[in-house]
Image: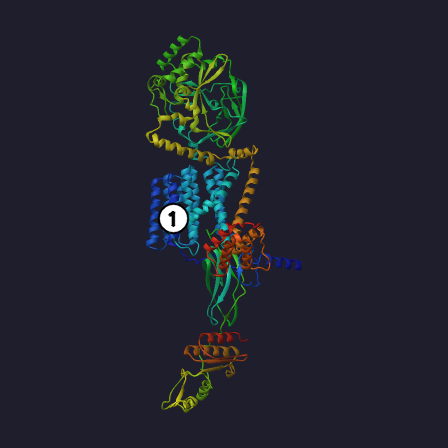
Amino acid sequence: MQAQWERLRLWAERRLPALTEHRRREVLPIELHRRRIYIMPTGFGLAFTLLLLVMLVGSLNYSNNAALLLTCLLGAATSISMLVAFRSLNGLRIRGVRGGHATAGEPIDVTFDFEAKHLRQALRLDIAQLVHAFDVEGRADVTVSLPTEYRGWLSVPRLRIWTTWPMGLFRAWSWVNPQYAVLVWPRPEISGPGPTLPFEDNRRQRLHFGEDLASLRDYRNGDSIRHVAWKASARHENLLVKDYEQPVAQQEWRLDWRHLQGLDHEARIARLARWLGEALAQGRQWSLWLPNEVIGIGNGPSHYTRCMSALALLP
Amino acid sequence: MTGWWKAKHPVHERITERSFDLLSLTTAFVLAVHAGHVPIWLTLVFCGALILRWWQRRYRPGSVPGWLKVPMLAMLVGAVVLDYGNLFGREPGSALAAGLLVLKLSETEAPRDARVAAAFACFLLMAALLFGQGMLATSVVALGLLPALTTWRSLEPTQASPSLPRQLAPALGLLAASLPLALTAFVLVPRLSSPLWGTNGPSSAKTGLSDHMSPSDFNELLVDDTAAMRVSFDGTPPPQGQRYFRAFVMWDYDGRDWNRSEQLEGTQIPVEATRTIRYRISLEPTHQRVLPVLDVPLDAPPQSQARTDGEIFADKPVDEVREYELRSALNYRFEPSLDPVTRLRALQLPDGFDPRTRALAGQWRQRYGHDNVAIIQAALAMFHDGGFSYTLLPAPLGRNAVDDFLFNTREGFCEHYASGFTVLMRAAGIPTRVVTGFQGGFWNQMGQYLLVRNADAHAWSEVWLEGRGWVRVDPTAAIRPQRITQGAAGAAGNQLPWYQSGLLESMRNHWDIVNRWWNQSVIGFDALRQRGLLTPFGIREADVSLLTKLLVIAMTVFGAAGLAWALWRRPEGDPALAALRSLERKLAHAGVARRRSEGPQHYLRRAARSLPGQRAELESLMRCYIELRYATAEPSTESLRSFRLAIRNFHPRRVV
């Protein structure tokens, strides 16, 4: 009995993937086809069918052929609207999903990339208790916001694509369970101390010493003797000084996991996340040292993204 | 499946202005189609309320306050009761429903309300057809479905508001697409041979044949285009000139009215028939007991009784469609021996009426002696050559009605002629009686039945001749033979009012063909004709189970076609490659098959070498293909089309 039930369930999952509570993730792109599109009359559709039946019996009873003809016409239009509802889902493709960035607690944007050969109107997407209406002709992006709670991978939940096009008499729907997860960054702590700055000034200078030179210029009073380019000066009448492209205006931050002892795991992550945000906002350079990974010096949004993602993925 | 039945729309969602416009338009259609029977002041009130509400929603947005609803409803009910004295029945019901629809609009803000209102409007549009199902009314109702369907469409999300005609067009397309399915269903849905519940109501007041006849009685009847009965014959139908359907036989004349005789006894029809015909009549409700029959019936159908003059009366009034089957004589001697009482009855004339008519009859009797046939011919000749005309609107007649008719007005229709002729004959001493019933009818070739309308009502005479019995004489045929060959409308000829004359008349006549087609093929398509539907395929009687089977089969076929349409997808494939494959087939036929190892460029070069006569062509094709394939990511449709055309026009010439 149990085995039979299991077999039936497996068969249903295979044949009717969108009707059963299909837990299996689907690889993108996903195309909606007849095996996974379901169609049922809406409540209004049922009521209207009842009304049509009343009109049918009435016109037959009164042998009113004109009314019968028009009742048949409405009935036929109703059945065609069912096919139209099916057709507006059939062949619809989800080409891909793109995730945005958000820290835990903020809604995260997820964009679905739809494709359809002919125009599909009045489609709707149910995800996370929200309904989004959209049209697809050719390609269309639908962006939805998902609530987030924890850092780490957030799987895109099962979503329902449905329509009651064209007359609201039938609802065609298909469940879709795309294999896609978005990375939710950790939530930074609200406030706390700044990072300790372990580097001395001279170390910073030395750090830059090996870098390429931008240009040489004449020696001016007050220039450090270290900056004199001796070899080049030998071939000139004046002393030449190495000129660095941009003197570093601010100190680099070395954001180190190990320096945050005494805090619990998540609090450490939250503090590092806050520092990362501050570093980005102040335009600093920073490096991030995690127990399993070291991300070298860098700055800018892409560096920030890399660091935040690494934080999000910490165990 | 959570939230399956939950409303997906927030409760406060309001419909767009355009949706409300469409709904108002639908309601306007409803009011228009019901304007014919709803009192004019009520229609005006409804229209006013509709316009007011439309204006209010557009320029002073906000819903109508709830406390107004109850008084408005009470006023509506009050108005209907005031006008009709009743709330139930067809007319008050439809007036009330139209008012309810207008009231519904006053509270329509949410999509759900709009949907329900549009569905209710559809129902009301249909209900209007109960009051008349002419082609014009039906077309208007069908037109009214467009804004209703479009209302539903406009309630779907992401709908823009194009111009009104452009917005209505898809609904028209939808209706057009549903037409084949609708027509099939219409033809095959089994009709009820008797209604499930009573359908009489105001229709019982309809005019019909009556059991007495006075001048201008038929006036209304002769323009009543509704069906009276439908007759199907076993074998060939009798010719037009023999399609006389007897209803009442009038014996007693009081100078003004003709009446049936209640004093006839006996239920046997004394007829000697040499040729008979069997037929079936489907009689529309008349609310009378008389059953019209063809000419002289041989016996009465079940649940009815015959009388010696050939009248047949049902045991109960005909309140529903009644079908009966019987036999009638085509060649007969009807009551060859007349008993003296009956003879006297057939000669009775009131004293002190119509002296000139009696004098004329006396002259004829003197001139022709005992030759009754010659007297009859003299009378018919008088009608034919004496300046008589056929008209549906004759001048009124004085006290001596027959004198007036024969010597003064000389115009009238079948009643006048039958009455005048009968009085003449009786005055000349020939037993004569008036018969009323129907004559003619429309032979429906497709349904193989004769449709007899109320307008085909007719009156003629029967004279009794020694040795031949009662013989039918139709004096109307003498004055206007078209009455017999073309029916009442044909006979009316130039008697039509001014607006039916000339060009207008010819247009009306042409239009009438459409009307008749509509009457025949849509309105007249009833249970009887439906049964005859399959006669061309050798099935005489298509009964309900057969029709149901056919209906199911047809629906399955349509369903399959619809599914095929829904599932059909444009073939994906690569059109350039497909074109190349066809070129390869052509070349292979000419002896240059593509080798597995060859690319298209190499292959076509080789082909150009082996077909030197077409070298330039092949090389151009090759360049074209390479360009289509590799020059752009997505080749333009024009270049693709020209490439395919070039390949279609390429015919390799085999080298010898």
Chain to which mark 1 belongs: B
B644 sits to left or right of B507: right
B295 sits to left or right of A225: right
- Up/down of B34 relative to B229, above or below: below
Q: Residue at x 54, y 80 (%)?
A: A291
Q: In this rendered view, identify the residue nearer to me: A266 or A181.
A: A181
Residue A242 screen position, x and y as percent: 41, 86
Visual colour scheme: rainbow
Residue B267 screen position, x and y as percent: 53, 20
Q: Amino acid at mark 1?
A: Pro
- Up/down of B151 relative to A265, above or below: above
Residue B245 screen position, x and y as percent: 47, 24
Q: Which residue in the structure is indicated by mark 1?
A: B165
Task: Confirm whether residue A90 shows in the render.
Answer: no
Q: In this rendered view, identify the residue nearer to me: B1 or B347.
A: B1
| Quadrant in the picture for residue B124 | top left
Residue at the extreme front of the image, as rendered:
B656
- Up/down of B82 relative to B629, above or below: above
A277 sits to left or right of A4: left
- Up/down of B413 relative to B358, above or below: below
Per the image, label 1 sits on a secondary structure element best described as helix
Residue B149 screen position, x and y as percent: 43, 48
| Quadrant in the picture for residue B516 | top left
Q: Residue at x 48, y 27 (%)?
A: B289
Q: In this rendered view, identify the residue nearer to me: B42 or B535.
A: B535
User: Which class describes the residues within 10 Å of circle 1: few (<14), some (14-19), or many (20+)?
Assistant: few
